[in-house]
């Protein structure tokens, strides 16, 4: 079953200290000012920060659901097509993206929502 944008926002908003901002064509998700995701309503896709190895594994495993977006600062950003992913898997990926951007002291205060 596909994940809807409403479910994505519920997942994002459950994380600590997330700021959501809306632009003309996409929304940005940040934790303490650092971006960890982008949502494009027109295409129903979300770009998420991941490790380089996770980016490569996701794209290789299911290229119909994931595609490489870009790499920066040792991280690989991946585009996720919401129609091809279950909410539980998306929750894990969003948490990981948040965790990679949040400061250590904030991560230590939050239970691992991906489990």
Image (tube, rainbow, N blue to C red):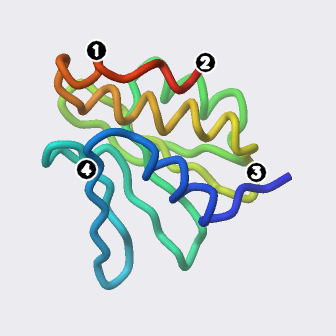
Corner quadrant of residue 71: top left
Mark 4, Cα crowd under 10 Å, few <14 / some 14-19 / many 20+, is: many
Label 2 and label 4: CA atoms lie apart by 22 Å
- In front: label 2 or label 4: 2
Q: Nearer the viewer, residue 51 or 15?
A: 15
Asked if disc 4 and disc 1 are in contact, CB closer than 8 Å, the reply is no
- Mark closer to the chain start, 2 or 1: 1
Label 4 and label 3: CA atoms lie apart by 24 Å
Label 4 and label 1: CA atoms lie apart by 18 Å
**Please, what secondary structure does the residue beneath circle 1 have?**
helix
Q: Nearer the viewer, residue 85 or 113?
A: 113
- In front: label 1 or label 3: 1
- Mark closer to the chain start, 4 or 3: 4
Mark 2, Cα crowd under 10 Å, few <14 / some 14-19 / many 20+, is: few
**Please, what secondary structure does the residue beneath circle 2 have?**
loop
- Mark closer to the chain start, 1 or 3: 3
**Please, what secondary structure does the residue beneath circle 3 have?**
helix
Label 2 and label 1: CA atoms lie apart by 15 Å
- Mark closer to the chain start, 2 or 4: 4
Dot 3 corresponds to which residue? 84
Residue 108 percent across, percent down from the top left:
28, 14
Report whether 83 appears left or right of 60: right
Q: Is residue 47 above or below residue 98?
A: below
Dot 1 corresponds to which residue? 108
- Mark closer to the chain start, 4 or 1: 4
Identify the image quadrant of the C terminus.
top right
């Amino acid at each position: 079953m596909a994940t809807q944008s409403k479910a994505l926002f519920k997942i994002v908003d459950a994380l600590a200290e997330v700021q959501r901002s809306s632009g003309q064509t996409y929304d940005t998700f940040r934790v303490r000012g650092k971006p960890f995701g982008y949502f494009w309503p027109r295409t129903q896709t979300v770009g998420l920060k991941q490790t380089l190895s996770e980016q490569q594994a996701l794209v290789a495993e299911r290229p119909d659901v994931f595609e490489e977006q870009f790499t920066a600062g040792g991280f690989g950003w991946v585009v996720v097509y919401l129609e091809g992913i279950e909410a539980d898997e998306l929750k894990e990926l969003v948490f990981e993206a948040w965790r990679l951007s949040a400061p250590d002291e904030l991560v230590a205060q939050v239970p691992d929502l991906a489990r």
